[in-house]
Image (cartoon, rainbow, N blue to C red):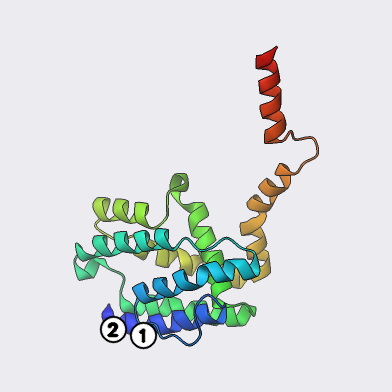
Amino acid sequence: MCGLGRHLIPEIAASLKQQGLLDDSADFSSVDQLLDGLERTSGRVAQSINTPPLDVPALREEWRALRAEARGLAPDRLPTGESLIGLWTQLKAESARQDTSVFDTSSMLALSAVRSAPQGARWLGASAVVGATRTGQVLAASLIEQYRDRLRDIQEAGYAEYATRQLRPYVRAAASQFAPGKPTLTARLLDRFTRKST
């Protein structure tokens, strides 16, 4: 896995640098270094593009949980280096074909994974523990297969259509919050206070 990391981490870092999420002049050779880099830039990026900062502490905890589970498993229970490199290659190729960044495409894949997680569970840490204890396999194997399936969906539907389908529930929920007939939280609290006072 260390050899695989030496191959993939710089490529992942290059994709994050293209998005301005990592310092372009820094070198990264481990996940911990990537997380350190994200931590340094997340606040600055959030201020400049008006998005919430990355939750790097949560990412660190997910990474710690995954590493702890993976250490206790036999090597044949972990995803192969070939499967991970293959998925990365597919992700880059499909991103180029769809004229989107690897970051955008992988974000849609991650959103799909989160949406399909049972009962809204935190998809990595919580599911990795369940997967490791019940089946003896880390969640990564099923995520790899799910990502491959979703990449095929993107290839068939196109990135824009796939992203629209993934984001539709969130857009619908946000729009309903601004519906003119929907009482605001403040109005509901005032109404409740008024009823109690009378």
Q: Image quadrant for the C terminus?
A: top right
Residue furthest to the right = 180
- Residue 116 drawn at (x, y percent): 49, 53
Closest to the observer, 134 or 197: 197
Q: Is residue 73 above or below residue 182?
A: below
- Residue 139 drawn at (x, y percent): 35, 60
Secondary structure under badge 2? helix
Q: Is residue 65 visible from the viewing direction of this image?
A: yes
Which residue is denoted by mark 2 in the rendering? 3
Secondary structure under badge 1? helix
Side (left or right) of 24 relative to 68: right
Residues at circles 2 and 1 in contact by the CB criterion of under 8 Å: yes
- Residue 10 drawn at (x, y percent): 41, 84
Amino acid type for the residue under numbered disc 1: His
Would you call the spot at circle 2 few (<14 residues within 10 Å), some (14-19), or many (20 or more)? Answer: few
Which residue is denoted by mark 1 in the rendering? 7
Q: Quadrant of residue 71?
A: bottom left
Residue furthest to the front = 197
Q: Is residue 158 visible from the viewing direction of this image?
A: no
Residue at horizontal 75 percent and vertical 44 percent from the top: 178
Amino acid type for the residue under numbered disc 2: Gly
